[in-house]
Amino acid sequence: MAHDAAHLGKQQVYEQFENIDQQNESYLVGMWSFLVTEVMFFGVLLFSYVLYRWQYQDYFYTIHKLLDVNMGAVNTVILLSSSYSMVLAVHFAQIKKRSAQLSALLFTIGCAFGFLIIKYFEYSHKIHAGLVPGPKFVWPAVDNPELMANVPASVAQMFFSLYFAMTGLHGIHVIVGILILGTLSFLVWRKSSLVEDYMITEMIGLYWHFVDLVWIFLFPLFYLMPR
Amino acid sequence: MANSNHSEGHSHVVPIPVYTKVFIQLLVLMVATVAVAKLAESNKALGDMSYLNNFIAMGIAFTKALLVIMIFMGVKFSTKLTKFYAFLGFVWFSLMFLMFMDYYFRKDEMVTGWSEVPASSLSRSRVVPGS
């Protein structure tokens, strides 16, 4: 695989760094350290999921049929597309093509909104069906009461607690991503000197890819659960 | 405060076709994981083997994650220190996972507490008044 050793334009070297390579590496290490904390953050939820799925394998399998695989698959395609447009934004930031960078960023934001809109339809259906854990939880679920009749309500509440906690936390990350990407797009549009250094786009890109990564695991864990 | 020193970066600009190829691979893997799940669901002959679907689904998820981390997140083209930090997240997560799994697998084991030590073994250390 050939990669050009590129001329990335002038980057300002701040006085605490010896050279641009050290500065860029510091940025990356700092961002990855943050992402490590995010891995732990989602890790505990993932761990809770593993434990309860282990304990209630058959019940979890039955309950997961209430989730819409097609909606989950479409959301996966949307997030993968947004990751692709994000790397393009970083690429164009590196070679200083501002208008192409802005287009790629706006496409990424559009994908993020698309993801949230589909999530909104999924959530609203679950909320109307009374599947939000709590005192108003309706069980057996109205969508498939015969099949769900054998599943204890307590296990169903646990499933949906994990579902809403994990996809909800992921959704919050998507919203934060939209805010950050929106700010970056605005600064690129205004040709601000703050975003002349492509590393800012690269850092935001890392965050966005992490959001994609989390969904890559959430999708099979919740939507494609085997018997 | 920044000094006025400017410098050329030495990072690599990855050509767009490389990203496009990875994106297509990700989409193919996504379609494959859904297809396998639906096949296992609809085909009763596979019913007993459907646990394989678990390995396939998670295997594909890990492959997708690896592609995103190595190419999209640029770990493949970064310095050893950055690679180390990227790897660290999975080390911490694995440690946490192993320790908690160890606890949950052995949480029902009977622990011999101080009160359950046979009285005979206590007699040597215990001073009984009046003896």
Image (spheres, rainbow, N blue to C red):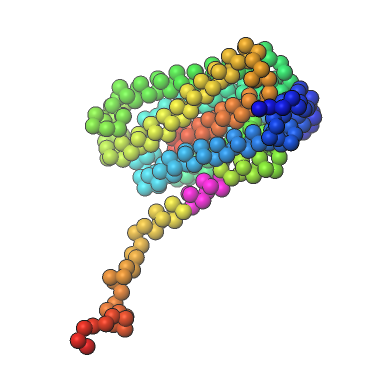
Q: Quadrant of residue B26?
A: top right
- The image shows residue A158 at horizontal and vertical percentages of 33, 39
Which quadrant holds residue A125? top left
Q: Is residue B82 above or below residue B10?
A: below
Residue B12 in view, yes or no: no
Residue under the image location 70 percent in, 32 percent down:
A15
* Image-based side of A162 in relation to A21, left or right: left
Which residue is at a point 35% across and 45% down the rendered structure image? A56
Q: Position of residue B113 (x, y in %)?
A: 32, 68
Can you say which quadrant of the picture contains the N terminus of chain A? top right
Q: Which residue is rendered at x = 56% and y = 45% of the image?
A: B90
Nearer to me, A161 or A141: A161
Q: How many marks?
A: 0
Q: Is residue B94 magenta?
A: yes
Which residues fall within the magenta stretch? B90-98
> Hey, which residue is sitting farthest left in the picture?
B130
Q: What quarter of the picture does the C terminus of chain A occupy?
A: top left
Q: What residue appears at the point 43 percent right and 23 percent down from the top-left corner? A: A119
Secondary structure, magenta segment, majority class = helix
